[in-house]
Image (spheres, coloured by chain):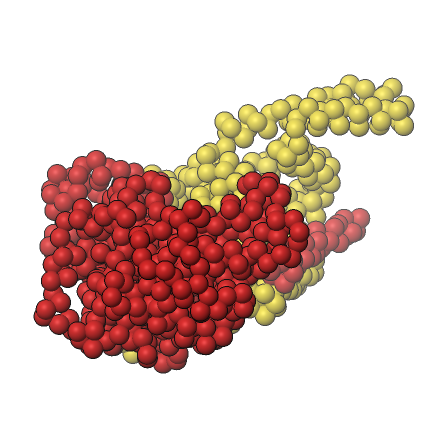
Chain colours: A yellow, B red
Amino acid sequence: MVGLGWVSVYAASYSPDAPADPFSHLSFQELMAFNWFKQILWIGTAIVLIVVLVVIDSKAYDTFAFVLYGIMILLLIVTPFIARPIAGSRSWLELGPVRLQPAEFAKFITALAVSRYMAGINLRQQNFRDQLVLAGLTLLPPLLIIAANETGQALVFGAFLLAYFREGMSPLILLILAAAGAILILALLVPKLWLMGAFTVMLGLIFAFNPRLMRHHLPMSLSIWAVVIGMVFGVDFFFNNVLQDHQRKRIEVLINPSADPLGVGWNVTQSKIAIGSGGLAGKGFLQGTQTKFDFVPEQSTDFIFCTVGEEWGWIGTMVVVILFMSLLARVLYVAERQKSVFGRTYGYCVASIIFFHFCVNIGMTIGLAPVVGIPLPFFSYGGSSLWSFTTLLFILLAIDAYRKQDLERY
Amino acid sequence: MQYLEGRKYVVQAIFLAVALVFAARLFYIQVMDGSYKLAADRNTLQRIVQVPYRGLIYDRKGQILVQNTPVYDLMVTPREVKKLDTLRFCELIQLSLEDLRAGLKAAKAFSRVKASPLVSNLSTPELAAIQDNLIDFPGFSVKAHMARSYNTKNLAHALGYVGAITPAFLEKPKFSKYNPGDFLGITGLESYYEKELMGRRGVQYRMVNVRGIEKGAFRGGEFDTLSVAGQDLHLSIDSDLQAYAEMLMQGKRGSVVALDPKTGEILAFVSAPMFEPATLSGKGMGNRYMDLLNNTERPLFNRPLMATYPPGSTFKLVNELVALQMGVVTPQTGFPCNWKLVRCTHRHEYPSNVGIAIKNSCNPYFYQVMRTAVMRGRSANRFEDARLGLGEWRRQVMKFGLGEKLGVDLSQEKKGLIPSPDFYDKRNGYHRWNFRTVYSLSIGQGEIGITGLQMANIMATIANRGWYYTPHFVKGIGAGGPLPQYRVRHTVGVDPIHFDEIIPGMQGVVDGRGGTGGNASLLDVGISVAGKTGTVQNPHGDDHATFAAFAPAEDPKIAVVVFIENAGFGGSSAAPLASLLMEKYIRGSVAPWRKRWETWLQGPGEKFVRHH
């Protein structure tokens, strides 16, 4: 997968003007100018990282989870003050030639911390205090990240809900969130009075068919109805006052991509054109015209999927989708075979995070999700992202390797 | 915890559902929906049309008349214009501030990022004067293209001109292959032979990146086509004769057409007043065009093709030939010069045969010839008799190429008019007209309308004794011959023997004692001319003078028609002019003692106005 990713980064940053055999002509510094070369370095360091991660006693992750969490929170707080702004957000730390994004690492550290906490409580026991702490652990990093203006990365933490669900969180929460999401989208698409009427009629129908509900739960039902109606009308406020300009536009574009094809809609339109022009088998390696000639922006990072889609066609994109599905299936399998709650929760966190990235990244390139600046795991160019996913995954493997010892401990 | 086991399937189901949605969506946009491929091509492919070299135009002796020279358009890209020093700029390119502002505004309206022309058609010296300084003005660039340049000051009416295609043209299906900004022949031969002159455009597909910068050929140039240069045109025009004719027509209004009767090739073609072909090329051509258009002398009016005059006495020849062919008269038929029927030109001997009648251009004689031909007694009703007779007479006359377009290789040609019985039915009412109504036709007056070209063609037909090739300018396209329609011999349905009856009469007009065309005689240089004078009655002013002739009478090499508007009697102005042209063409030069006619013709126009 990483190899395919590199090939795509190479293709995306490939320029016909470059010398045919760069290694024999260029110095290290010059090579550093090419993303594909830097990505080799990143992959190399990632391999070193893997060795380190696996060598470390997996109990260390368990033990130091909260310590790491503390350090990370500190780092997240400090980062906006010491980082130079890049593309509107102060979230990159510069260490010599290398730029790191602490938010990337917040994912696996938070995953560790919540898993550690989860191991000590029972979500089903409805211990309100424990649930509150868990929610706090989960929400603190994204809030800090939002403060650093990296909303996309913050959204990833929503993926933890899937892991909590597996560990016993009430499905109602998922359902309510899904319903809220649906209402929000509907409120943007359908005139509000219609929606209000529809919900009112729905409530009436429910009462008509289930008179018991009206008798026993009238206040409850009415308040749900009121909340729903409130949300419908709150959307506008949220949309116009809470969201930042570019975020609002991204959602508008999702609803109607042709609204501003040369402005905000450009990314999505061009990305779809690039992928769509790939056809069944693609244009062939390095033959992509849309990606090669810079029609698609951010093509080696967030829009790397376009290069795959254009050069390898539907077959290529299917390979990527199937690879991700295999990886996720494998992660879930590994998670399920953990004997400890810590290991299993962590495994589910890993799967959820990767799934969220997969979902949103590919979704945005094909116009199914709003444009959110998050990378495609293992594919996109970028050291932080590669390191972070490597760490995420291999900590799970390390934990898995020691699962028999866990059994002995508990 | 076993009861939570089942939840792993929910998570798996969510993962799988998303994967399936992605697979379906990807399948749809990548495989099912072809529009993304088109959009991708629109993004990257730039179609570059290579306009080929336009064909050259030569005269019959191989002299180049029209060629191509590079001219330059000063282009402006509004978005890139920064801190324009308008004062200096206007001084440099010699443009008024108002024009500059208007030009910039128009350019902005077209596109801010694409270049549009600000000043068109700068010549190489004009460009050289500004090019070095242009670097100080960002946003301005120069685009070269080919424009017509002329090695001749003559023949503008036939050559036509080349101009940028107009939006109105672009909407017509015929011009669907043209793009805005393309050049094409607008009038004349440039327009008629546009397909041949244009050649075949080459198309190159280039790939461009998002900033429009070229990134090489598309698929190694697999779809590119090379342009093919246009074909050259070889005209039948004799440049020397043309220049001579235009010189003689200087300061007059009218037309001259000279044909080679044996081939139908046009040797000279003058529409006066003239203008130089270069007038409609190069910088400022738009303004000069408007000047020509608004000129009260109407220089753009292509007289030999578009001005239809009553042909006057020259038409008497056709009238006679038609009657002879019908067998209603013989060459020996005599008619009295009866002034009660119609006034005659002058007192003369009794027209006892056609020769004498032609020599004296006797109006009553030809009145009676036509009456004999029309009033055949087919019906007891003289109105009906006139209807039937005129119809048959007209059919015969039209075989001479009258009353309809001859089909010369210029598009402006008019049909002229040989009035039909229907014409008089409409104008006067059915059975409310008879021969007395239409008799003017017999002497080439009245409703009849003939173009100069048609008159020249009549002369060629008489010279050939009964046949003609459609007059044409182009005797060779590329290495080939003329268009196929100019290789078909048309016969006019009159036996050659009848021509032998009237040609001596026409010779008498010029060389006979007291002939009306004596001024056209070339006997002293050994050439026998057959001709006919004409005076076209003009209700709007002074009469028009015509003279139609061919020479040498026994083996005709040239047929000439000269129309001079408002110059009165044809014998005094048109006849000597025609004779000079025939002498010049046949002998190559004009005998010194005949130069006096040149002086005479170039004198003040008023002296031609003589009434008869």
Between B606 and A256, the residue placed more toward the observer is B606
Residue A341 at x, y percent in the picture: 66, 51
User: Residue B156: which quarter of the image?
Assistant: bottom left
In the rendered view, tell whether residue B108 sits above or below residue B394. above
Answer left or right for B37 relative to B481: right
Horizontal and vertical percent position of residue B65: 24, 68
Q: Is residue A402 visible?
A: no
Examine the rendered structure and indicate whether residue A274 appears above or below residue B236: above
Where does the image place residue B446, in percent across and percent down from the top left? 43, 47
Picture quadrant of residue B406: bottom left
A211 relative to A320 in the view: left or right: right
**Does any portion of residue B110 appear in the rendered image?**
yes
Quarter placement of the N terminus of chain A: bottom right
From this view, report whether residue B149 is shown above or below residue B232. above
Residue appearing at x 49%, y 75% in the figure: B495
Q: Which residue sits at x=14%, y=45%? A: B94
